[in-house]
Amino acid sequence: MHIEPTIIHAIQAAGEDAPAILRAALTGIPHGRTGIPHGRIGLVSSFGTESAVLLAMAAEIDPSVPVLFLETGQHFPETLAYRDQLIARLGLTGVRDIRPDPAQIAARDPQGQLWAFDPDACCALRKVEPLDEAIIPFDAWITGRKRSQAATRAHLPVLEPQADGRVKINPLARWTAAELDAEMTRRDLPRHPLSHLGYRSIGCAPCTRPVGEGEDPRAGRWAGMAKTECGIHV
Ligand code: SF4
């Protein structure tokens, strides 16, 4: 379960250079041209408005990188279509849908309304518990979080050791929304179909609304509730 120290050192040597961090994580060599895929590092993606850049960078290094997508059953249809579009465009072969246990859904949320009165329990059922199980084979996981996304992420490090011995790797920690937008344009990457409607951070449909000018990109997530994270990053 512990990431190899050589990979940690390679990531540290990469500083805040996102492609070099990814190359270090996936091959053990931050600036080399080739390496041996490590295979015990996964990438967790929401296939949201800002997911494409990280996925494109990872695909350039290893298109078979395991990509975990939490298929909660509550996504916008546009997100599922965008996931399929990016898989085809980037040639990703390791994307897997992580679903909640149907027996647990039947027992704890048979009407699919748990989000309305206990969103923490809903996220635990649909995201945290399925990911906890799916992540077992991996030593580390790569996320697309950025310091610029929200005040709660202002001090996000590139390397985040976890209590269970795993490490989260955040290659885009220093990136701003403007830099990501420019990189998407430079790479001619497709946009999430809802991004032009004011959705700047997209999760499950019942818990996501568009945001206005000057709002945190994540202000539209669980708006009106005292909740800012789904629980997989706390
Ligand atoms: S984001 Fe909303 S619908 Fe999705 S798992 Fe969490 S509470 Fe449930």
Image: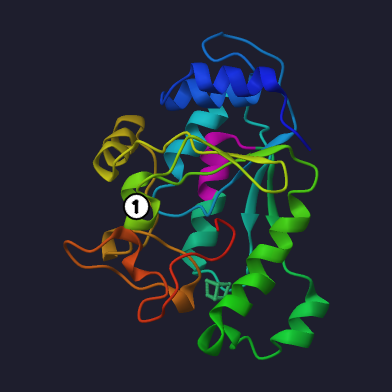
- Vertically, is 107 above or below 123? below
Q: Which residues are magenta?
A: 85-92
Farthest residue, direction right? 103
> Is 181 on the left-hand or right-hand side of 83?
left
Residue that badge 1 annotates: 149
**Residue under the point 30% across and 70% down:** 210
**Residue under the point 56% across and 41% down:** 88
**Residue under the point 31% across and 59% down:** 217
Residue 201 is situated, as x and y percent measured from the top left of the image, at: 38, 60
Label 1 crowding class (10 Å Cα cut-off): few <14, some 14-19, many 20+?
A: some
> Is 92 on the left-hand or right-hand side of 129?
left
> Camera-side residue: 111 or 30?
30
- Vertically, is 233 above or below 36? below
**Residue under the point 41% across and 26% down:** 16
| Residue kind at label 1, given as amino acid type | Gln
Farthest residue, direction left? 213
User: Helix or strand or loop: what does disc 1 sit on?
Assistant: helix
Please identify the quadrant where the N terminus is shown.
Answer: top right
Q: Quadrant of residue 177?
A: top left
- Vertically, is 86 above or below 32? below
Quadrant containing ligand 1 reads: bottom right
Please identify the quadrant where the C terminus is shown.
Answer: bottom right
Q: Main secondary structure of the magenta part?
A: helix
Residue 159 is situated, as x and y percent measured from the top left of the image, at: 53, 35
Residue 41 is situated, as x and y percent measured from the top left of the image, at: 69, 35
